[in-house]
Amino acid sequence: MTSSTPSPANPASSSRVVVIGSGLAGVRLAQRLGGSGGAGAVLIGEEPHAPYNRVLLADVLAGRFGPEVIGLPPVPGEFLRTRAVRVDRADRLVHCADGSVVPYGTLVLATGSNPVLPPLRGLFEPGATDLPRGVHAFRTMDDCLALSEAVGPGTRVVVIGGGLLGVSAARALAVRGAQVVLTQQGDRLMERQLDPSASALVHRHLTELGVEVHTECRVRGVRQAGGAVQSVELADGYVLGTDLTVLACGVRPRTGLAQAAGLDVRRGIVVDDELRTSDPHIRAIGDCAEHSGEARCLAAPALEQADALADSLLSPRDARPYAGTRALTRLTLHNGRPGSAPLDLAAFGDPEHRPDDDVVQLADATRGTYRKVVVRGDRLVGGVLLGELSAVGALARAWEADDPLPDDGSPLLHLLTHDGGL
């Protein structure tokens, strides 16, 4: 996974770190490099907005936060608001859309991910590349602001996709008073994170909020009139009238810049334990990176990779190789009603148990709480908690440590009921 490239024409740039991407990973790295006595980095970000925490976009859409509240801390060093269009590996130069050329010693690709646009019949008119009016992805601040402007009480909305993103969008839009239909192709909501019992509680929460949820429901296409989508057609032929359609079908690593530069790309940009790409002068972190065959596209791995790379660049001798991230998924579903409690959920590892696994479950249907942990052999391998998360801190630490559990199982029950802190 190595190659040789000539030294840059400008020797002064041989130690310069240039970061492409102003999301969580890129900003975290730039902050670390500029705040630890290092030379800092040049950050290139194409969004017109100041860097923000993408995880909190649903709260902005719901009207709970203003856009400025989810802004990330200021980035030390140089910040270029432009789009990187080409990487010249031979001369170690980044060419930008505004005509600027930025030399680098080490280039870090933190280009993030793009929303998946499903192959729906009628979504694009012949020759069109932009989404039609009334159809929105839900990935960027611009997406969020456009939806916020378009939605209001009584607006008919169809959300396509019942994963974490779709559930968050549906909840936020319902809080704004929209009439929301959520369609999920799988047999339950958030099937990647939740087991059937936990998913049923999320389903109930959304239904109580007024969201019409359809699982095992495949969308076949959309119908346009006057350049705007006015209905959504399901596979069984049923047609849903809509004012807004939200595509929440997941994301995929954004790798176009890396592919054009000739780097090794599979699903994401392939990196080793030092987060190096197939070019030793180029690293990759965050959603765009594929490490050990996985491109996680989650906040926790992005931040851990940024920290690992910062350690490596600031103190190479003391840095530890990146060994992967054991990510915990957290989501809070506010229902927008004064005085009512939100639904909190957390999931980690593999909550689906096998026949030989040991399972501990605690459920309270009246309170709408649910806790489950799965033990495989002598290891805690996964869990899911809804409605009451006081034990999630202790459970997450036990899972992350991956240490053997005592034989009698009593400490596991203690972990499940103990307020371990968050």
Image: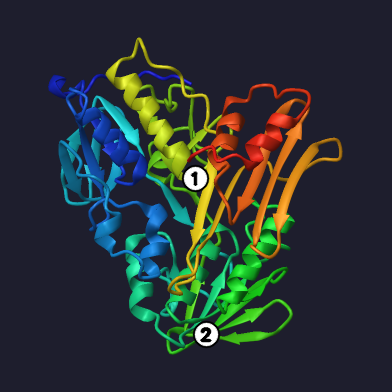
Q: Secondary structure beneath disc 1?
A: loop
User: Residue drawn 15% across and 36% down?
Assistant: 77
User: Residue drawn 54% across and 47% down?
Assistant: 329
Q: Is residue 51 left or right of residue 78?
A: right
Residue 217, position in %: x, y? 70, 71
- Which of these two is toward me, 189 or 415? 415
Mark-to-mark CA distance, 2 and 1: 30 Å
Up-down relation of residue 133 to residue 388 (above or below): below
- Residue at the spot of label 2: 242
Whether pointer 2 and pointer 1 mark residues with C-beta atoms closer than 8 Å, the reply is no
Q: Earlier in the sequence, mark 2 or mark 1?
A: 2
Q: Secondary structure beneath disc 2?
A: loop
Residue 206 appears in which quarter of the rendering? bottom right
Classed neighbour count for the residue bearing mark 2: other residues with Cα under 10 Å, few (<14), some (14–19), many (≥20): many
Q: Amino acid at mark 1?
A: Cys
Q: Is residue 124 left or right of residue 318?
A: right
Up-down relation of residue 65 to residue 13 (above or below): below
Classed neighbour count for the residue bearing mark 1: other residues with Cα under 10 Å, few (<14), some (14–19), many (≥20): many
Residue 406 appears in which quarter of the rendering? top right
Q: Amino acid at mark 2?
A: Thr
Up-down relation of residue 103 to residue 422 (above or below): above
- Which of these two is toward me, 232 or 225? 232
Is residue 121 shown to the viewer in this render? no
**Tag of residue 399:** none
- Which of these two is toward me, 80 or 23? 23
- Residue at the spot of label 1: 297
Is residue 154 shown to the viewer in this render? yes
